[in-house]
Amino acid sequence: MKNKISKKRHNSYSGQRRKRSFKEWTQQPHFYGALAMLLPLTAILIAYIAMGVFPFGDQATMIIDSYHQYVPFFSEFHNKIWHGESFLYSWHGSLGFNFIAVQAYYLASPLNFLIAIFPASMMIEAFETLIILKICLSGWTAYRYLRRRTGRNDYSTVVFAAFYALGGFSIAYNWNVMWLDSIVLFPLILMGMERLINDKNGLLYAVTMGLAIFCNYYMAIMICIFVVLYFFVIWFSRKREGVGQFFKSGFHFAVCSVLAGGLAGIYLFPTYYTLINSSQGSAPTSFKLYRNFLEIFRQQFALVEPTELTGAPNIYCGVLLVMLVVFYAVSKNISLREKIGRLLVTGFVLVSLNINVLDYVWHGFHFPNNLPGRFSFIYIFMVVVMAYDAWQSLRLMNMKAFLGIFAAEAVLFGVCLWYPKDRLPLYSMIVTGILMALYMILLVAYRRHSFLMIKGYKVLPQMLCLLILTIEVAGNAVFGLCMNGTVNRTSYTEDRQEVSAIRNHYEAKDTFYRMELAQIRGRDDVTWHHLNGMSFFSSTADDREERLMGALGFYNSGNKYSYKGATPLTDALLGIRYIISNEEMWASNLSLCEQTMNKYVYENQQNLALGYMVNPTLEQWKIVEGDPFVTQNDFVRLATDTQEALFTPMTVSEPEVTGGMLTSTGEDKYFYERTADNGTLTWQLTFTEQQDVYIYFEASHCEKLKVTIDGETETYSDKRGHIVHLGQCDAGKVVTLDFPMDNEYDTGNVKLQMYAFNNNVFESAYTQLADAQLQVTDYDSTHVTGSIQASQDGLMLLSVPYDEGWSVYVDGVKTEISPVGEALTGCWLTAGTHEITMRYVPQGFVEGAVLSTVSLLILVLGIAVKSGIFRKHHRKM
């Protein structure tokens, strides 16, 4: 009987169910939450259509570092997901690198696993999809924060949230996809802090802060600095509750913050050990303003071109919103305590963007390499919040205050226009002026409860104002994205299948080998193509390895180095067996294996295995920065019994100078002063006997070396210097070296060395090194097994970057490893045949994993206690 009654009631209810009207839908929070994501999405899609981004054309938005680093790292991440490889280590770059550290900076976002649904050929599209998704999500989280402040479900909340999602930071730096998770989480972190202090519930703060640290520890540093300041802002805004309550809240905040850090321990611990060996900047020694504050303020004008690499910080967040901050400051309907706290902390963030000492602290006690003002998103969000609060109380403001504020803002706008330094484009000043005038008119009408008549219809000024705001935020986003520029998608991906086929072919022939690219499009091409190479570009690059590569004569610059600058010795030393080239090559150690449609594949006939025996005296090898031929000669002398020089110096005549004056400073170095535009330094090299010739150059403000041989010219650009192979130079051959002076600088320095390569010495050294090599029988991302037969006690050199995460077992017994040449790995072996096993676990990984697990258990336990699960269970018992 009960079942029949229930069924009847259900049928009766179903018969009365009706569809919600559109008006009812618009009253739902989810409707406006969806709009907060849809508005940024629409603006981005319009920009992509205008730029011809795939599938609307053949362009892609992965510019600058995303071109060189991020897409290749995403490709490697995708490769590991699909092939079930370990996420701890990768051989595809840098001779092998700690992949956990790379994940912690570039790939840790859980959203990144979405790339698994894309095929390998669509990594660019996967990358761009994540950018769009994260920007849209930041609109949603900003909407949730603003809605919580007032409880309002209306379109104004959507528009203000959109100015955060499409603000200057997100538009200029959207290609830094690993930073966008912090932009998404920041509003939720502040919401969580407010709950922690006001409602004594720290769950949201601990989870979102922990997730921010987990996703990108670098951006989390800036958020952590801010939340400490924001704690005092929230507390100061409250009514006085006594010192005891302050310390209780502070303790609660500290515990939740530690718990948040603990959740990310699995990344933080291994990354710490990696970063202590990465390139570090020096601390500022004096106080310095980067630029006039009027220049900073003008960055908030409409249609200001985004700063990508250098320039003023990206702080655009809407013309009206900046105007409304003044209303916020004078409003009598907003708590004075809250106003003081928010204005002070926001002002401090703005000032920090322009003072070197504070900028250094905010960036984690490190000066960023270009991309200034990486914490400007904090300023943007605070302006959005204050402007939104002011918008809610505009009608309660005195009309005289209205007019006074407008007059003051008009004067400030005029001063910005008058300021002569680095004038903004005329269109930016005109559009900003028009917007200010329109907003002033509409806000006055709104304050007076007036309306406008347009073609016989009454139009409320606040609705018209929101319409203009929508056009402004979307239009500025489209403009900024278009100004960022694009790259050609086809040129980036056209050789992917061809190189993949080459790699697969040689993988079937060799257990472990290294393969490099003679020409590169991007700095991390070997990672993009999943090759066991030595080229690498990453913020987590090991400084010791970078110094070694530079000392050996490879191209290197800060946190990047590449195969450009190789010699037969470095090919052998690092185990480079195959080289893929876009053109024909010649070197004494190379032979052509095959020619595919667009590639030449060369084999280094004198490559060495992953490990090989060297003389014990190699422990004394000291790299000599700035003189790679000496460093390579020393390696041969110490690692083998060959004492002759591999490279012998050749005399270089004085250069000819046009448009400048030259002074020799000794040791193959020259100082020049430019006296006219388009000046050059020219060396005319004429050879008297057949020799295999290499040069090494360094040039500051004179970086584009042009090498002309037999009428063909090749250009090299590298201020840090690298080796260039001139090839086999017969008697009477003439080679011309041109160094064009940079017209932006009046002075500069050039260093040029020339050496002849002695192939007989190399053959002798190689024969000894090849006598006892590690025969690799099996390997994967974190394990290598093989055997070696040592004729005598000595040192086995492994062409693997020294990393304490590696453990080497000789015949099952763990053996101590030590750095060789600062960056490579060595271990001692006795005479005889040995089974070698190598295992990799990142230093600090186990401790970090334990900490993350414990922190997660504490969090789950806290949730259970808070929700009363244990009390309910006790009552049932």
Image (spheres, rainbow, N blue to C red):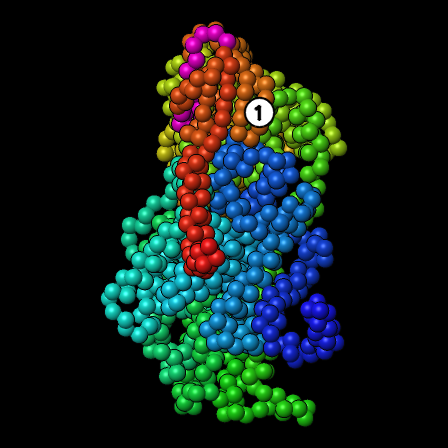
* Residue 27 appears left or right of 556: right
Residue 507 x %, y %: 66, 25
Residue 410 figure quarter: bottom left
- Which quarter of the figure is the N terminus placed in? bottom right
- Seen in the picture, residue 681 relative to 257 is either above or below; the reply is above
Residue 548 x %, y %: 44, 29
Q: Residue at x 38, y 29 (%)?
A: 667
- Seen in the picture, residue 442 relative to 821 is either above or below; the reply is below
Residue 403 figure quarter: bottom left
Q: Residue at x 59, y 44 (%)?
A: 74
- Identity, as a three-letter code, of the amino acid under mark 1: Tyr
- The residue where tag 1 is placed is 779
Q: Residue at x 45, y 77 (%)?
A: 389
Q: Is residue 764 magenta?
A: no
How many residues crowd around disc 1 within 10 Å: few (fewer than 14), some, or many (20 or more)? some
Q: Nearer the viewer, residue 355 or 836?
A: 836
Farthest front residue in view:
1
Viewer can see residue 412: yes
Residue 340 x %, y %: 33, 73
The secondary structure type at the circle numbered 1 is: strand
Residue 328 x %, y %: 41, 78
Total marks in image: 1
Q: Is residue 828 magenta?
A: yes
Q: Which residues are magenta?
A: 819-833
Viewer can see residue 425: no
